[in-house]
Image (spheres, rainbow, N blue to C red):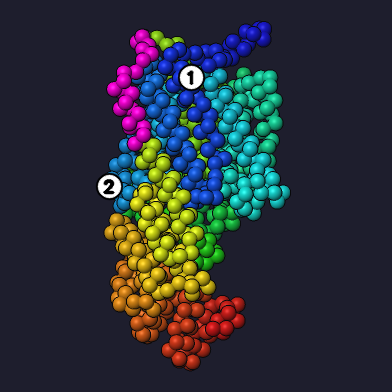
Amino acid sequence: MGKRAREKRERRLSGEKKPRLEKEEGSSSIFLRIIRWGTYLILFTPLILSGKYFFPFVGPKSLYFMGMVEIIFFAWLLLIISNPKYRPKLNALSIALVLFLFVLILSSFLGEDFSRSFWSKYERMTGLLMWFHLFAFFLVISTVFRNLADWFKIFSVSIFAAILISVISLFAKAGVDLTGLGQAARGGATIGNTSFMGTYLLFNIFLALYLILKSAGGLRIYLGISLPIMLSALFLSGARAATYSVVGGLVLLFLLYLSFVPQKRYLNILGKISLVGILMVSLISAFYLFQPDNIVHNWFIEKATYARLVVWEGGWQGFLERPWLGWGPENFELVFTRHFNPCMFLGECGGEIWFDRSHNIILDTLVANGILGLLAYFGIFLSVFYILWRRYFLKNSIDFWTTGIFFVILIAYFIQNLTVFDMINSYLMFFLVLGFVGSLTVSGPEQDVKPRVNSVKEWILAVILIFFIFSFFKFVVQPTKANRGVINTIRVQSPNERALLGEKTLETSPLGKYQIREMFADTAISFSQSEQAKNFSAEEFKTELDFLSKELEKSIKESPLDFRPYLKLGKIYNLYFQIDPTKLPLAEEVLKKAIEISPTNQQGYWELAQTRAFQGNFQEALILAEKTVELEPRVINSHWIVIQVAKIIGDNDLIEEKIKEAIEINPEWEENLRSI
């Protein structure tokens, strides 16, 4: 068989019609051009960052992605009106995505806080609003790009963006910060987190491998250079979950190749036995992971810290409370504080006291969307596997490498998500892969398609244009202005100005409103303890405190099970002490409610002890402080507060008694505690 014949056969097995983009005329050509170049620009989302915005590595990326998706989506709407052949067709994957979206919507409405579920916050940007944009992205790319030539270009652009990120990461390892935001020390390049960067590189490494196996000439040389760069960046990043998943994925791909490709039967049998063996080992390891004092459990704690298991335990309790549809997307932090483990302040439990994710895709989905949500989520993966393997075995329309590599990408992605969670960078790549698999279902000869109409009626164009302007302004422009407004507000030194700018920011967009209010409160609390605070009058401080208390009261009303606004409001009321002592009863009220919501969280007791001290009720302040010692005796801050209250009371015997009790728990505390 000659070279040309082999290439022709390979294209047939891959579902490729011809290695060039389809040509269209008239308005369709304009819409296709917008979609094509818009898609290329979307693939540069992970490179977007700006220190002028709140959460500079997340907010700008997510808003950029949503803005670009809206542009290509509305161009697509016009395209499918003028050209019916690009209209979506039902298939297993699109049905699975619609079902998952339906469950998300249902759990958002029936969950604890719809606003939080829909808008999310600038730190994450993964609420229902983002899922609508991701689904729109899938619809566009899965119906418009049908040839392998299209996808080769798309994957090549994605890999180019990944190379840039890899180079930035490698320079950071050498101490050269190319981001301008201190990432040389932090890691993660423009993505801002090594784990998230690892997930992003995981996808692109397998895409590069796919293109190497499917392409030739200059493209293969380009990919041969890019693959080592991305692998180096991944292995040096410290992203353990992604690194292990890439290595495991390559092993799985090799075993799949042995099982289905070689002509020798004994190799097929060896591959299949190995696959079964790996599956059994994985299931046994998963079982022993949750059993204490065994090699699997201890290895996991060493690599991922005990904090993961502590958070998972609290998440599981939250799931049991609402098993079917969960608490709603983005509401995990309500569950976390509700089932707070007092050991979270200790290094062995991670030393982090705020979690809005469990860092486990299964548990996160169960808490957010319940059993129905998890089944729908699994349905997305199963539909992809069904399409890939059915087309390989039954229809013989795609080759092994297309089936095997895209199967392995999703397996590796899912495995690493057992200890990580998704952000816009990984969601972008996940839906890019879904779009490619979805496009396989519409590839092939176009038959029985209605004649193309290359014009769009003026009234339809007007409706779509109005809808686009509204959506772009509401979901992209306004949140972008609010995001920038947060930074402008917290950088201002005057309390009066901060109140005015803060109010304007919160009126601009509801996205992240809870987190923004808390950020403004933290800024005011920190500022009150600074030297600059002496330059402002009590009346100016009162203006800002009045604004903050009003906003935090809104948070409590809108999300009554959220511990954080109660705690922050209690701190604000305590700040009033020297300005307006009549606020102390309000501090007492909200802090008691905070303790009721999170009874095992020391922070509520510590702040209420401060309120009692301001009220002159030192004995009750002492009781509250001692309660936190009972919750977790190994937290030094609890002992420190107990001794401080004893010092205010003036009981030297009690001070000595409490110091001795603390030193018995940890002798290393002695110098620190006696310094009081």
The front one of 675 and 253 is 675
Q: Position of residue 552 (x, y in %)?
A: 34, 62
Q: Position of residue 637 (x, y in %)?
A: 50, 74
Q: Which residues are magenta?
A: 449-470
Q: Which residue is mark 1?
A: 146
Q: Is residue 540 visible?
A: yes
Relative to residue 321, is residue 208 depicted above or below?
above
In-image side of 221 versus 552 (left or right): right
Relative to residue 271, is residue 332 depicted above or below?
below
Question: Which numbered marker is on residue 220?
Answer: none
Q: To which quarter of the image does residue 666 belong?
A: bottom right
| Nearest to N terminus: mark 2 or mark 1 | 2
In-image side of 408 versus 458 (left or right): right
Local SS, label 2: helix
Q: Residue at horizontal 48%, vertical 92%? A: 653
Question: Which numbered marker is on residue 110?
Answer: 2
Label 1 crowd bin: few (<14), some (14–19), many (20+), radius 10 Å: many
Q: Residue at horizontal 59%, vertical 28%? A: 156
Q: To which quarter of the image does residue 453 belong?
A: top left
Label 2 crowd bin: few (<14), some (14–19), many (20+), radius 10 Å: some
Going by the numbered disc 1, the residue's amino acid type is: Arg
Q: Position of residue 163 (x, y in %)?
A: 64, 36
Question: Which of the two discs, 2 and 1, sits closer to the camera?
Answer: 1
Query: CA–CA distance between discs 2 and 1?
Result: 38 Å
